Image (spheres, grey):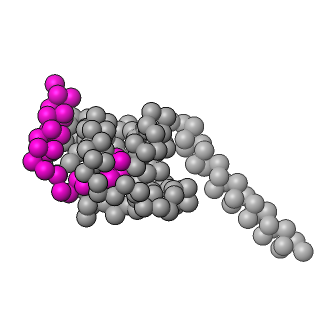
């Protein structure tokens, strides 16, 4: 009986210490949260894992209802140019100073580099992601506008030279 209580006490102490040590480390301010510091192993592994599971659970499973309609892509392009290119860039468009300073870096959204399902991309644009610079656009954009941004993101790998020039111009104005 004594061994049983020793095992239970040891287990409870282990659980308590496992929970308290990280809290104590955080309370000391020892963890550097500067954007110019590489994240630690736990942050690099647990945060993306938790983010991906959460997005998969909450995102709609539907595909973009607008597809590749040129009129839809034009609307999505306008929103992307105003709100997204400064951080996410585009093929053939140089990074802005803002994009270079992000940690974590904003992912490239061009085809082949981003295999995120449409519903997950919609959800992330609408709700944003905590602890990243990505805001929730659902408070300033309708669902229809967000789906049109998704349609444009799917078009990124096929930018026309005119679209690329317009995105470059938008970024060069921001970098002044």
Residue 99 x, y percent position in the rendering? 26, 40
Magenta segment main secondary structure? helix
**Quadrant the C terminus occupies:** top left
The reply to whether residue 45 is visible in this rendering is no
Q: Which quadrant of the structure image shows residue 118?
A: bottom left
Residue shown at the point (21%, 29%) measured from the top left? 174
Residue 168 painted magenta: yes
Residue shown at the point (73%, 58%) measured from the top left? 13
**Which span is picked out in magenta?**
148-176
- In this picture, residue 170 sits left or right of residue 47: left
**Quadrant the N terminus occupies:** bottom right
Relative vertical location of residue 33 with respect to residue 2 in this rendering, above or below: above
Relative vertical location of residue 18 with respect to residue 140 in this rendering, above or below: below
Residue 30 painted magenta: no
Relative vertical location of residue 28 with respect to residue 157 in this rendering, above or below: above
The reply to whether residue 11 is visible in this rendering is yes
- In this picture, residue 36 sits left or right of residue 55: left
Residue 140 x, y percent position in the rendering? 45, 33
């Amino acid at each position: 009986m004594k061994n049983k209580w020793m095992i239970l006490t040891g287990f409870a102490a282990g659980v308590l210490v496992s929970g308290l040590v990280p809290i104590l480390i955080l309370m000391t301010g020892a963890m550097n949260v500067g954007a110019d510091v590489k994240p630690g192993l736990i942050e690099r592994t647990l945060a993306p894992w938790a983010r991906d599971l959460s997005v998969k659970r909450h995102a709609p499973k539907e595909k973009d209802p607008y597809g590749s309609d040129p009129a839809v892509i034009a609307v999505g392009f306008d929103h992307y140019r105003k709100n997204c290119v400064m951080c996410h860039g585009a093929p053939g468009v140089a990074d802005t100073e803002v994009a270079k300073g992000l940690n974590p870096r904003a992912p490239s959204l061009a085809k082949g580099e981003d295999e995120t399902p449409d519903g997950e991309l919609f959800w992330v644009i609408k709700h944003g992601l905590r602890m990243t610079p990505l805001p929730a656009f659902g408070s300033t954009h309708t669902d229809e506008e967000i789906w049109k941004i998704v349609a444009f993101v799917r078009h990124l790998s096929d930018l026309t030279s005119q679209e690329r020039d317009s995105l470059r111009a938008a970024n060069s104005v921001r970098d002044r």
